[in-house]
Image: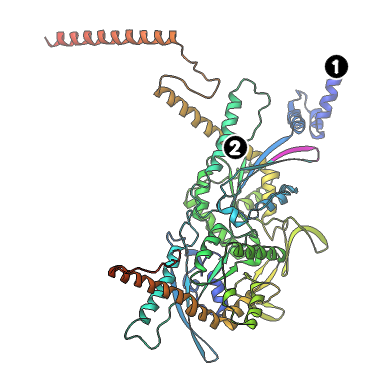
Amino acid sequence: MNKRSGLGKSTLMNTLFKSKVSRKSVQATSQEKIPKTIDIKSVSHDIEEKGVRMKLTVIDTPGFGDQINNENCWQPIMKFINAQYEQYLQEEININRKKRIPDSRVHCCIYFIPPTGHCLRPLDVEFMRRLSKVVNIVPVIAKADTLTLEERDFFKQKIREELQANGIDVYPQKEFDDDAEDRMINDKIREMIPFAVVGSDQEYQVNGRRLLGRKTKWGTIEVENIAHCEFAYLRDLLIRTHMENIKDITSSIHYEVYRVRRLNENNTAVAHANGLPQHHMTSHEM
Amino acid sequence: MDAIMLQEKLVERLLCPRVRTARRKEKQYVGFATLPNQVHRKSVKKGFDFTLMVAGESGMGKSTLVNSLFLTDLYKDRKLLNSEERINQTVEIIKHTVDIEEKGVKLKLTIVDTPGFGDAVNNNECWKPITDYIDQQFEQYFRDESGLNRKNIQDNRVHCCLYFIPPFGHGLRPVDVEFMKALHEKVNVVPLIAKADCLTPNEIKKLKDRVREEIERFGIKVYQFPECDSDEDEEFKQLDKELKECCPLAVIGSNTVVETRGQRVRGRLYPWGIVEVENQSHCDFVKLRNMLIRSHMHDLKDVTCDVHYENYRAQCIQDMTSKLTQDNRMESPIPILPLSTPDVETDRLIKMKDEELARMQEMLNKMQQQIHDGKDQ
C-alpha cells in the first residue's frame, strides 16, 4: 500500500478483509507521527473462510510523499520489492532448494490517489511510472466521499488519460490478457479504474440492516453500496475474481523479468572475468 | 443666519435619533457626537479595499471557497494544468481583482492566488515566491509612503492569508509547518481545514485538536482574534468564544446550487445526502465568512498595518542604518530620509574636525600622564 498518511490505507485494508489486519488496530491514530524516512512495515495474518486458508501480508509505507522534498522517495519501495524477488531467486537457484519456496514477493501494490478532483500530481506520475514496471499497480481514489459523482467521473477520466499519456500500465495490463474472453472482462475493468473507494470499520444501522459505513450530518455513506462508492468492485477484483491472476502475473512476468536481468548481470560479470563479449541489456530504472 | 440654519440642518441630518433626544436633555452640547457618522459617510464614499491571499496545494477547493465567500465567479477563464505541465511548474502569483457592491458600500477585493504551491515532487522553499511577493508589497508601500506625492497611495499589502490544510492527513505536514512559519510574521495567517465534507464530526474534532496542538508546539503565530470589549453584549461574547474554540475552521465550498428541503442553497449533491455550505452543523463556512467579512475584516487590516507592516518597516530602516554605519557613504533606494548625502566640502570639514579632536585627545592624555607622573614623584 502506498500513500501519504491519512488517506485511509489502514481502514481500507481492514474493510477489505473484514478483520483487523492492519497496523491501525495496534496503534492509536493520535500517536501517528510523520516518520522522517520512509518505513516499510510488513504485517502478516492468517485468515480463513469456508475452510480456505490464506496467509495475507500487508505492507505499509508510512512516510511516503510526506516530506517537503520527495525526490526519490520511491527508491526504498523499489528496493524492497526487488529484495523480495532476490530472496525468491536465491532460493530457486539453490542446489538444495525447498519444495515450496516461501513466497514473500509483492503481488499487488495499491496506490492511493488523493481526491483532489483535478489530475494526477507529479509525484503520483513519477512513482507509478517506475513501479508499474516491477509490480502490479492498482490505483484507487482514496476518501472518495469528498467527490460528487460528476467530479468523480471527470477525475477518473483525467487520470486514465494521464496514465496512458505517461505510458503507465496499471493492472490489469492490456498486454497480459490471455484470450478474448479475458480481454472483454478486463476491458470493462479498465474502463472503471481507478476505483473510487471509501473505507470504514464501523457499522451503522441503515434501513434495518447493519452496514459498514461513515456517518455524517448529511447522510450515511454505505461502503458496500455501489451507488455510493466502488469499494465492492475493488474487493471483487482483488479477492473474488482476480487474485489468482494477480499472483500469476507477478510470478510469470514481473519475477521472470527480474530473473532474466539478474542472470544476465551474472553472465556479464562472468564474461568480464573471462574477457568475453557481453550482451547489451536494458536495465530497469531504479 | 441662513448659514447657521444650514449648519443646524446638516447636524440634524447627521445625528441619529438617539443622540437627538439626548441633546434635548443636555444643556452643554458641542456636537462632535456626529463624528462616527461623518466618518461613515466619507468611508462609504471612498470605498474599501481588501487583499486576500489563498495558499495550499491544488485541489483543496480554494477557488470554490473564494467564489462561495464572495458570491462571484472569479475563475471563469481558468485553465487547469495536467500532470505533464505540472512537472515543470513553478509557484506563481496571480491576482484577481473585482469590485463588488452591497447596499451602497463598495469593496475592491483582490484575491492573490498561488498556483503551484506544494505540488511538485521537491517542494523545497516553495513558499519563497510567496514571501517575496508579500515583502514586495510592503516595500512598494514603504516607498510610496516616503515619497513626495502621497495623495493616492494604492494599498496592495496582503491583509490576510487563508492556508488550506488537507483533511486527508493526521495533522500538519512538514510543508504546512514550514510555510506558516515563513509567513506568520509577515501576514495574518488563518489556517483552514479544506474539503471538510470527507470527515465525520468526530474526525473533524480530532483533526482540529491535533492541528491546534501542533500549531502551539511549533510556535506558529496564527491570526488571533482580538478580545471582546467588556461592554459588548453577551450574545456577541458567546459567538466570539465559539469562534475561537472552532479554530482551525473546517470549510466546504460550492459553485453549485442544489435544492433541499424546499430551498435552493449552495451545496454539494451526493448519493447519500446533500451538504449545505451555509449550514452551521455541516461546516464552519458561515463562521469563516462572518469572521472574515462581517466582523474582523477591519481588524485584519489594522493588524497588517500596525504590526506586520511596521515590523517590516523597522527592519528595513534598521538594515539601512546599519549599512550606513558600515560604509561611510549613503546608498539608499528611498528618496527622503533624515540624513542627507554628505558632499565633498562637508566631508573635508568632518575630517578636519576629526583630526582636531584626535590632537586634543592626545594632548589631554599627555597632560594626564604628566600629572600622574608628578603625583608619583
Residue closest to the eye, B279 or B80:
B80
Q: Residue at x 57, y 46 (%)?
A: B91
Residue closest to the eye, B94 or A192:
A192
Q: How is the image coloured?
A: rainbow
The residue at the far right in this view is: B2
Marks 1 and 2, the one that precedes in the sequence = 1
Q: Secondary structure at mark 2?
A: helix
Cα–Cα span, label 1 and label 2: 43 Å
The residue to which callout 1 is attached is: B3
Kind of residue at badge 2: Thr
Quadrant of res B188: top right
Q: Secondary structure at mark 1?
A: helix
Q: Is residue B14 above or below residue B290?
A: above
Taking the image as drawn, is residue A212 in sight? no
Q: Which mark is residue B304?
A: 2
Q: Is residue B122 above or below residue A198?
A: above
Which residues make up the magenta segment?
Answer: B102-109
Whether residue B104 appears in magenta in the rendering, the answer is yes
